[in-house]
């Protein structure tokens, strides 16, 4: 973790930002994908912007607050509150109550924060102030926004968004709309579409496929949960040079994607670091986006901003994973991906209803969500692109891949991982040994 400086922030009184014009008061049902147990949490996102002399005298808090009010006219469900219907079904009460907005002034220049703005950001709790009563799922604001001004004229924008309302693609659409309206557009270039019924259960729900992502082994779950309050976080960078080193572990012309290879490598290294019994069952959850895939025969409108992904799991004995070449894990990943079809998606949607929205297994599970495509580092609110933008920490066994540049300006993916201290030390040692040839040049 980067060295941190003590900072303090003077917060203004939190306020609710409501749509700038009248919006429908109605109740909307979420889809079954939205309503999964795994995504009943809030995602923290930070973006950092340098001072821009062309925006001298303009207050980012006022500009973003005004833009939010306009954007909420189009995304009015975000200004509502979640309620539970029969069988704990989540619905949105579109009451126009508003999103929570905070502004603050920090006592430091942005430049002084250095690399610590990247995950895991030690200032997260300051840059996304937790207003009492705002961090729940039911009845709480669905979006919290904080604008923090630094003494140099730079600023940070923090978002805390309820994952039940949208996934990465959906939030990208929202941020695009916010950016466009701030910069003078009258309507977003892509209009949001609700239509959550497209990913809802069939009239006669039926589980027709195996879904090991919900298999829970009590002893393994207890073992992980007993560690959760002791977990520490560190980030690991993978650029072109690192990926070339990993590719040297597989045969030439071996058929796999870079992300499949990276996930296989990380899963194996993390499992070695945890030092589990060889017979222990370990899992890798692979997030698969279902938008725009004609082979799945599920047509979602371009403006659909709800959750649209499935989370199949790859399973292995720890001993086999750790002792085999990385291609062993890659083949397991490819096999699981090949089994994802229209029936699998309908089956997991129906399972959510039949089994009462079960949580994703915690039994030695590892999940990495690839957020590079979202482009959190490309949203311009008038000050140019941020110097960093992305999800700011890992959550238990869930990690996020964010796009960053290293000291040489080379783009890569940064992944924050949570582990107990001893396992983290082992994982860091594995990383250093694997990339010892290039680490001095990072």
Image (cartoon, rainbow, N blue to C red):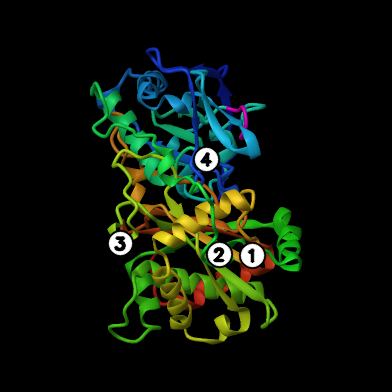
SS state under label 1: loop
Nearer-N-terminus badge (3/4): 4
Nearer-N-terminus badge (4/1): 4
Instruction: Give coordinates of residue 207: x percent, y percent.
Output: 55, 60
Nearer-N-terminus badge (2/3): 2
Residue at the spot x=42%, y=24% of the render? Answer: 76
Spatial CA distance of label 4 from label 2 is 21 Å
Quarter holding residue 256: bottom left
Looking at the image, which residue sits at the far front?
A: 204
> 439 or 357, which is in the foreground?
357
Spatial CA distance of label 4 from label 1 is 22 Å
Spatial CA distance of label 1 from label 3 is 27 Å
Judged by depth in the image, the label closer to the viewer, 4 or 1, is 1
Can you identify the residue that label 1 sits on? 215
Judged by depth in the image, the label closer to the viewer, 4 or 2, is 2
Instruction: Give coordinates of residue 188: x percent, y percent.
Output: 27, 29
Nearer-N-terminus badge (1/3): 1
Can you identify the residue that label 2 sits on? 211
Can you identify the residue that label 4 sits on? 164
Tags 1 and 2 in contact by the CB under 8 Å rule? yes
SS state under label 2: loop
Residue at the spot x=62%, y=55% of the render? Answer: 396
Instruction: Give coordinates of residue 430: x percent, y percent.
Output: 54, 75
Instruction: Give coordinates of residue 214: x percent, y percent.
Output: 61, 61
Nearer-N-terminus badge (4/2): 4
Q: How many marks?
A: 4
Instruction: Give the residues drawn in magenta, as a range.
Output: 135-140
């Amino acid at each position: 973790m980067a060295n941190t400086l003590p900072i303090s922030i003077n917060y203004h009184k939190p306020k609710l930002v409501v749509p700038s014009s009248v919006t429908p008061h109605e109740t909307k049902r979420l889809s079954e994908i939205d309503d999964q147990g795994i995504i009943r949490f809030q995602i923290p996102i930070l973006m950092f912007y340098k001072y821009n002399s062309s925006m001298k005298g303009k207050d980012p808090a006022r500009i973003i607050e005004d833009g939010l009010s306009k954007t909420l006219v189009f995304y009015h469900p975000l200004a509502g509150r979640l309620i539970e219907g029969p069988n704990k079904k989540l619905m949105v009460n579109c009451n126009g109550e508003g999103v929570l907005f905070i502004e603050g002034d920090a006592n430091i220049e942005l430049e002084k924060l250095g690399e610590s703005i990247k995950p895991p950001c030690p200032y997260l709790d300051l840059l996304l102030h937790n207003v009492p009563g705002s961090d729940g799922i039911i009845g709480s604001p669905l979006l919290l926004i904080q604008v923090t001004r630094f003494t140099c004229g730079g600023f940070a924008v923090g978002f805390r968004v309820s994952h039940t309302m949208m996934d990465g693609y959906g939030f990208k659409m929202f941020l695009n709309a916010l950016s466009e309206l701030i910069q003078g557009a009258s309507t977003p270039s892509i209009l949001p579409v609700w239509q959550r019924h497209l990913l809802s259960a069939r009239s006669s729900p039926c589980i027709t496929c195996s879904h090991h992502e919900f298999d829970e082994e009590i002893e393994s779950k207890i073992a992980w949960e007993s560690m959760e309050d002791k977990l520490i976080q560190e980030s690991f960078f993978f650029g072109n040079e690192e990926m070339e080193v990993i590719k040297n572990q597989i045969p030439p012309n071996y058929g796999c994607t870079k992300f499949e290879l990276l996930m296989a490598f990380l899963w194996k290294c993390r499992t070695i670091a945890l030092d589990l019994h060889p017979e222990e069952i370990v899992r890798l959850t692979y997030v698969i986006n279902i938008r725009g895939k004609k082979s799945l025969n599920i047509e979602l409108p371009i403006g659909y901003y709800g959750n649209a992904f499935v989370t199949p799991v790859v399973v292995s004995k720890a001993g086999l994973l750790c002792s085999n070449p990385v291609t062993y894990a890659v083949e397991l990943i490819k096999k699981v991906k090949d089994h994802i079809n229209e029936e699998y998606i309908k089956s997991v949607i129906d399972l959510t209803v039949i089994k009462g929205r079960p949580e994703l297994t915690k039994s030695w599970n590892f999940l990495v969500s690839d957020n590079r495509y979202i482009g959190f580092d490309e949203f311009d609110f008038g000050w140019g692109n941020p110097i960093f933008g992305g999800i700011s920490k890992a959550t238990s066994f869930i990690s996020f891949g964010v796009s960053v540049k290293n000291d040489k300006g080379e783009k890569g993916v940064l992944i924050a991982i949570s582990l107990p201290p001893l396992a983290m030390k082992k994982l860091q040692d594995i990383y250093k040994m694997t990339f010892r040839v290039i680490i001095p040049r990072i």
